[in-house]
Image (cartoon, rainbow, N blue to C red):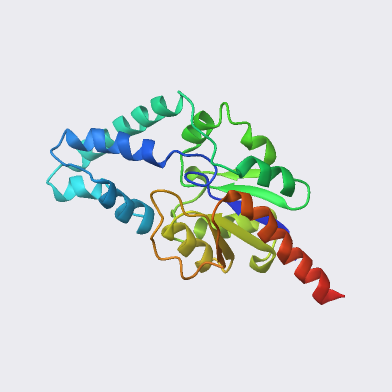
Amino acid sequence: MIRAVFWDNDGVLVDTELLYYRSTREVLRRVGIDLTVAAFVDISLRQGRSVFDLAERHGVSPGAVEALRDDRNRLYGDLLGRGVPVMDGVEAALRELRGRVTLGVVTSSRREHFRRMHERTGLPDYFDFVLTREDFREAKPDPEPYLKALRHAGLDAEQCIVVEDSERGLLAASAAGMRCLVVPNELTRGQNFHKAWRILRGASEVADAVLSLQEGSSAAAA
């Protein structure tokens, strides 16, 4: 029986990953690095590493790298403040699942960025809890974020399912022992999702996938 659904945020709930890429690219240009979309997707969304490693390898000092990261975070926050679009099908899926299962957000976004991007979306009202980057030491693809979500919900891995859009998120969920629904987006389509429980065409299919597991469990119990 599925009792909780843990949702990634960026690229799953809201369309923010290109904004993050653009703000990062802008500050890296100051030190002579041209960050391509392909490099961003591979380093950040597939491997789960910081693209600022490129600056360090380019000979930029640790202090200067931190200053670049701070500038990126300010720029990204400013872009988020202008409003971000909700991904297609998300709100309908949340409405259908709300009250039937525990709903949680497990994101690598900073708490302040999460707050800014959802100032106008209304999506946080659907969720029972939100875990942001400040809530764990290791980020995805490490399983710590999802292991913490399990502890927060007080549930076992087999009682929960994850909704992700990226390879690093899928690896984190799998390492935590949970099934994962993958909803690829423009940037992540084509990544290696062989560990996914299902690959969906959009968020509109999430509720049906979750409820089919519940119905299957009920039939087996009967």
**In the figure, 165 relative to 65: above or below?**
below
Residue at image location 63% in from the left, 61% down from the top = 161
Question: Of 9 and 38, which appears nearest the observer?
Answer: 38
Quarter that holds the N terminus? bottom right
- For residue 208, say whether it is visible: yes
Quarter that holds the C terminus? bottom right
Is residue 33 left or right of 220 when viewed as pictured?
A: left
* Residue sitting at the far right: 222
* Residue sitting at the far front: 201
Q: Position of residue 27 (x, y in %)?
A: 24, 33
Res 68 quadrant in image:
top left
Is residue 151 left or right of 56 when viewed as pictured?
A: right
Q: Position of residue 90 (x, y in %)?
A: 61, 43
Q: Position of residue 78 (x, y in %)?
A: 40, 24
Q: Position of residue 163 (x, y in %)?
A: 57, 55
Residue at image location 38% in from the left, 49% down from the top = 187
Is residue 114 left or right of 69 when viewed as pictured?
A: right
Is residue 213 left or right of 201 when viewed as pictured?
A: right
- For residue 141, say whether it is visible: no
Question: Of 214 and 103, which appears nearest the observer?
Answer: 214
Residue at image location 54% in from the left, 66% down from the top = 176
**In the figure, 24 relative to 101: above or below?**
above
Q: How many marks?
A: 0
Question: Of 67 and 94, which appears nearest the observer?
Answer: 94
